Amino acid sequence: MKPKRIGGTLFQVIVFLAAFNGILRSQAPPANQTTNPLVTKLCKELSVTPDQATGGAGAIFSLAKGRLNAADFSKVSAAVPGMGKFLRAAPEAGSTSTVTSLNSVVGGQAGGLASLAGSFQSLGLSPSMVGKFVPVLQNYIGSKGGSSTAAMFAGALK
């Protein structure tokens, strides 16, 4: 009587599954190329690059985080997928002369947003783009987290 070759068949199944898994992974986009819906929205509406969208939003979210208590910022975070990535992408704040130039662009009404001018310049964006990002972010947060969360976010930026 000839012994059964279970080991050989099992080995073939494992090899097949490993190869099939490799094919599937090679067809999926790399993790760093997955698209965040907010980044897509910013790129489309403001004609900015994904890096500019992520860094600019991150700078604004960082300002809001510093002005909101933890519970309130957690509501904002819940409305924004990938908040950690945005916060990590935020460039350093700019110089005083940059803040002064943004205040002159927006008539001295920029409040805390003026502090983001240098961050936006380091991303290759005009300081005036800060004012264009905010309504897009506020609308997005409102659509995902409700109008009260959006109003809280906007209030933190004043």
Image (tube, rainbow, N blue to C red):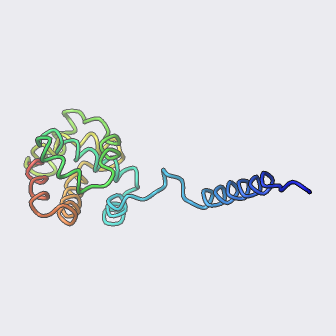
For residue 119, what is the image quadrant?
top left
Q: Position of residue 120 (x, y in %)?
A: 29, 45
Q: Is residue 130 above or below residue 68?
A: below
Q: Is residue 20 above or below residue 56?
A: below
Q: Which quadrant holds the N terminus?
A: bottom right
Question: Relative to residue 58, is residue 11 drawn left or right?
Answer: right
The residue positioned 42% from the left and 59% from the top of the image is 35
Q: Position of residue 136 (x, y in %)?
A: 23, 61
The residue positioned 22% from the left and 63% from the top of the image is 144
Q: Position of residue 28 (x, y in %)?
A: 56, 60
Between 23 and 53, the residue placed more toward the observer is: 23
Between 114 and 66, the residue placed more toward the observer is: 66
The residue positioned 60% from the left and 56% from the top of the image is 25
Question: Relative to residue 9, is residue 21 drawn left or right?
Answer: left
Q: Position of residue 55 (x, y in %)?
A: 33, 46
Q: Is residue 23 above or below residue 121?
A: below
Q: Is residue 61 above or below residue 137?
A: above
Residue positioned most to the right: 1
Between 102 and 75, the residue placed more toward the observer is: 75
